[in-house]
Amino acid sequence: MNNPDPLVAGSQRRQVRERALGLLYEAETKGIDMAELVDSLELPLDPYAHTLVTGTAYHQVEIDVRLEEFSARWPVARMPALDRAILRLASFELSYSTEISVAVIINEAVELAHEYSTPASSGFINGLLSQVAATVRPSSYH
């Protein structure tokens, strides 16, 4: 997997996450395979955005199983599509982008939810991702 450049500023990484979130949401709502969507883009993706969308899509089944494990009687399929995309993206980062801190990943996910989803989504996403982080990065999670 391509790992993010440690010299990339946080605001730039946020823009990359927003782009990845948009593509994940678009692929799901249109029922398009992620590789097909990426191939159809007019401009190439930032390398980390490419890693995020392709990695999230590749590991989606595994990610969804983990999310359902912690979502207490709330199946992933019943979650709003945008919340699902945020949760999948952040879960992928928590599992596979270990050079980025747990706090940064969760905070970015909560901010994306706050900006683009419902008022209740940010708290739900924060709680669910905290459980994911405790499982995939127990030594990094406090």
Image (tube, helix red, strand yellow):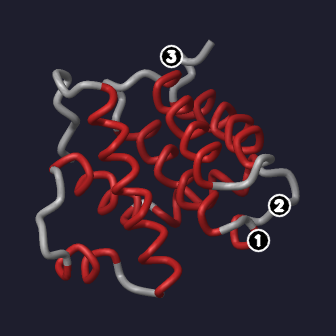
Neighbourhood count class around disc 1 (C-alpha, 10 Å): few under 14, some 14–19, many 20 upward: few
Marks 3 and 2 sit apart, C-alpha to C-alpha, by: 27 Å
Which residue sits at x=21%, y=37%? 3
Are the two marked residues, 1 and 2, in contact with CB atoms closer than 8 angstroms? yes
Q: Which residue is drawn at 36% across and 82% down?
A: 33
Where in the figure is residue 34, as x and y percent of width and height? 33, 75
Which quadrant: the C terminus? Answer: top right
Q: Earlier in the sequence, mark 1 or mark 3?
A: 1
67 or 100, nearer to the observer? 100
**Helix, strand, or loop for circle 1?**
helix
Q: Are marks 3 and 2 in contact (CB under 8 Å)?
A: no
The location of residue 24, given as percent across then percent down, is 43, 66
Measure the C-alpha gap from mark 1 to mark 3: 30 Å
Which residue occupies 51% across, 45% down? 91
Residue extending farthest to the right is 73
Q: How crowded is mark 3: few (under 14 residues within 10 Å), some or many (20 or more)?
A: few
Task: Give the numbered dot on residue 78.
Answer: 1
Instruction: Estimate the x, y position of residue 57 in percent, counting from the top left.
Output: 39, 66
Q: Distance between the residues labelled 1 and 2?
A: 7 Å
Q: Earlier in the sequence, mark 3 or mark 2?
A: 2
The amino acid marked with disc number 2 is Trp
- Residue 20 appears left or right of 75: left
Disc 3 designates what residue?
Answer: 140
Mark 2: give few (<14), some (14-19) or many (20+) Cα within 10 Å: few
Identify which residue, 61 or 53, lies in the foreground.
53
Question: Disc 1 vs disc 3: Cβ atoms closer than 8 Å?
Answer: no
- As drawn, the label of residue 46 is none
Residue at mark 2: 74
